[in-house]
Structures are given as C-alpha cells and as structure tokens.
Amino acid sequence: MEKTINWGILAPGRIAHKFAHDLRMVEGARLHAVASRSLERAAGFAAEYGAPHAYGSYEELLDCPGLDVVYVASPHTGHFGHTLLCLERGIPVLCEKPFAVNAAQARKMVETARANNTFLMEALWTRFIPLFKEALRLLDSGYIGALKTIRADFGFRANFPPEHRVFNPALGGGSLLDVGIYPVFLATLLWGKPEGVMASAVFGASGADDSCAMILEYPGNRLAILDCSLVVRTEIEAYLYGETGTMCLHNRFINPEELSISFYEKSAEHIAMPCVGHGYYHEILEVNECLRQGKKESGKLPLDFSLQLMETLDQVRREAGIVYPGEQV
Ligand SMILES: NC(=O)c1ccc[n+]([C@@H]2O[C@H](COP(=O)([O-])OP(=O)(O)OC[C@H]3O[C@@H](n4cnc5c(N)ncnc54)[C@H](OP(=O)(O)O)[C@@H]3O)[C@@H](O)[C@H]2O)c1
C-alpha cells in the first residue's frame, strides 16, 4: 500500500484554506499539523480540516512526530526563513510563490535543500494543471509552428485594506511578485532566461508597485510582452503566437480550463479540460509522488528553474525600480 503523506501547513492564511480544501480530495495524503503565530488560529484551522496537531509557533511544527512535508504559505518575505527552518531539520518543503523575494535568497534555499538532501519545490501550481500540461504538449509537438511571441497578463483590482500584505513593500508587496510572476513564469518555462529585459512600473501610496509592464527579449527574434496590476482587472489570458497559428489560454491562464487555437490555414479548435478542486490538487499529487519516489526535486519544476525565474524577476525589478526595504538586487 502507498505510504500516506502527512502534510503540515505553516501560516494558515487565505491560500492555505484553498490548499487544505484540495488536500482533502487527495488520496493517500492528509493534513497532519498546522502552525500559526497564534495557537488559537492554528487550532481553529486544524479543527476545520481535521488535522490532529496544532501549534502556536512555526518552530514547534518542526518537532511534530510523523510529519512528512511542510507547505510554507507565509507572505513573500517569510518564504526564505521559514523554508530554511524546515530544510535545516531535513523536512521537505513545498514553498509558495514567489519562491523568495530575490535570487540571492532563492540560491541559499536551493543550496540548503541540496546540502541537506531534502526535497524542495516552489508552489507554482500552474505547471501541474491538466490543460496547461496539454498546452505544453501541443506546443512541443509543433502544433502552431515555431513560437515567436508571447503575450500574457495578470491584473486584478485588489480591494483589500491599505495595510494588507499586497500593498506592503516590507512584505514584498506589489503587483510583480504577487501576480506578475505568472506571466514571467510562462515565458521562463517556454523560453528560459531572456537576453534582454525592459520594464516599467507605477507605484501606489504605500510605495508598492501598482502595475508593471515588461518586454523580455529572446534570441531568434522572439518577444514576451507581459503585464500585471493590482489596480485594474485585465483579461488574465495568455496568447502564444506561432508561425502557423495562435494558442490562447483563456481566463485565468494560470489555472486554465479552456484553450483555443486559431490557425492561419484551417478552422479553429477549442479544448476544455477541468481542474480538480481549486487546482492545487495537482501540485499536491506531484509532491506526494516525488516524496514516495525519494526525489529531492521535481523533474517538472526543478530548482534551477525557480532560480532562473527569480533571476529574471530581479532583472525586471532593477529595470522598473521596484525595491523592498532592507534588501538590494
Ligand atoms: N498559488 C496561489 O495561487 C497563491 C494565491 C494566493 C497567495 N499565494 C502566495 O501565498 C502567500 C500567502 O498569501 P495569502 O494570500 O494566503 O496571505 P495571507 O492571507 O495574508 O496569509 C499569510 C499568513 O502568513 C502568516 N504571517 C506570518 N508572518 C506574517 C506577517 N508579517 N504579516 C502577515 N501575515 C503573516 C499569517 O498567519 P499566522 O499569523 O496565523 O501564522 C497569515 O495568515 C504569498 O506569498 C502569496 O504569493 C499563492
């Protein structure tokens, strides 16, 4: 029989609820422990999702008996320290996106995972969504010819109070690391590190970037034209322009359930494929599988990819003047 994977959640906020919802749908895995800065919050969350252990500090989670893996779901600036806490104790980690706030932190996380021979993966769930995987397969097979241009956007109107983490530069707040990471993820996954980056951002009252526009240049006359925002809602679609056709991953391209392909020489096609749960189900399966096989990283979302993505985000920040207090890129 397959080993049941015992998950711990570190920082039970908004996304952790969605994750725990999906975890309940996964066979052979369960929520085993929850750790919050407040015991009351941890206990409430644990009771809601049936976890047997609750802790009032993140450090206590590390001593939880029977724990197999920790999902780090703190704000961006917490990812580095919270991931290291686990890795240094040899506890595998699935860390929320962005992996860290800069590439220097990401590098240290990867080094620590490797030095401790411990599993680590960034929670870029898009990579494991069934229709997204199908899109990659079609692109790989040359379905729309050589890909020349990528356009992708992610903008939403963040109707949160001004003190919310997304507006707080001290927590890595702003549109780029919150949502802009997805279009950059797409370009990086398809084409790797760009040869040139142009970017411009506009900033809100808190100093966090409200919106950011990016052009990534790749060899072979290829361009990725990307944008993100916390102040306006955009289509949240990805257009992939090939030499014989165009593929559109429809709203929201980060967890797509529909795509269409228009060809220059024949009629259009449409493909629909559902996600399970909120879509986090699929990344959980990947981590469970890696752990059962004793892998230290995912072949589909390797650590070098997360490093490359973080390096490109650093480059965008340098171009656009996006800085967080107390760190430099
Ligand atoms: N993959 C996705 O689709 C997706 C979607 C949304 C967010 N995310 C990522 O997940 C992370 C968390 O986002 P979220 O929307 O869940 O945030 P959130 O609702 O604010 O929750 C974050 C949790 O972190 C803990 N925390 C620790 N230090 C904190 C601090 N200094 N300030 C505020 N909270 C702190 C809090 O829990 P305790 O105090 O109880 O410990 C809080 O509930 C972000 O990095 C974000 O990029 C990913």
Image (cartoon, rainbow, N blue to C red):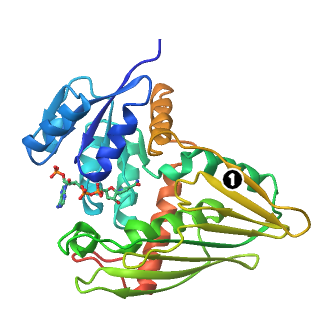
Question: How far from the left and from the top, in percent, is residue 136?
Answer: 68, 52
Residue 89 lies in quadrant:
top left
Mark 1 element type: helix
Please say whether residue 118 is visible from this viewpoint. no
Query: Please, which residue is most extreme toward the right here?
Result: 265
Question: How far from the left and from the top, in percent, is residue 317?
Answer: 41, 79
Q: Foreground residue, 60 or 268? A: 268
Rendering quadrant holding ligand 1: bottom left
**From what the image shows, is residue 154 above or below residue 41?**
below
**Which residue is identified by label 1?**
135
Q: Horizontal placement of 263 versus 172: left or right?
A: right
**From what the image shows, is residue 78 above or below residue 129?**
below
Q: Foreground residue, 311 or 175? A: 175
Residue 202 lies in quadrant:
bottom left
Question: How far from the left and from the top, in percent, is residue 261?
Answer: 76, 61
Local packing at callout 1 (Cα closer than 10 Å; few below 14, some 14-19, many 20+) is: some
Q: Horizontal placement of 106 versus 163: left or right?
A: right
Residue displayed at 19% across by 25% down: 52
Marks counted in the figure total: 1
Residue displayed at 34% across by 81% down: 209
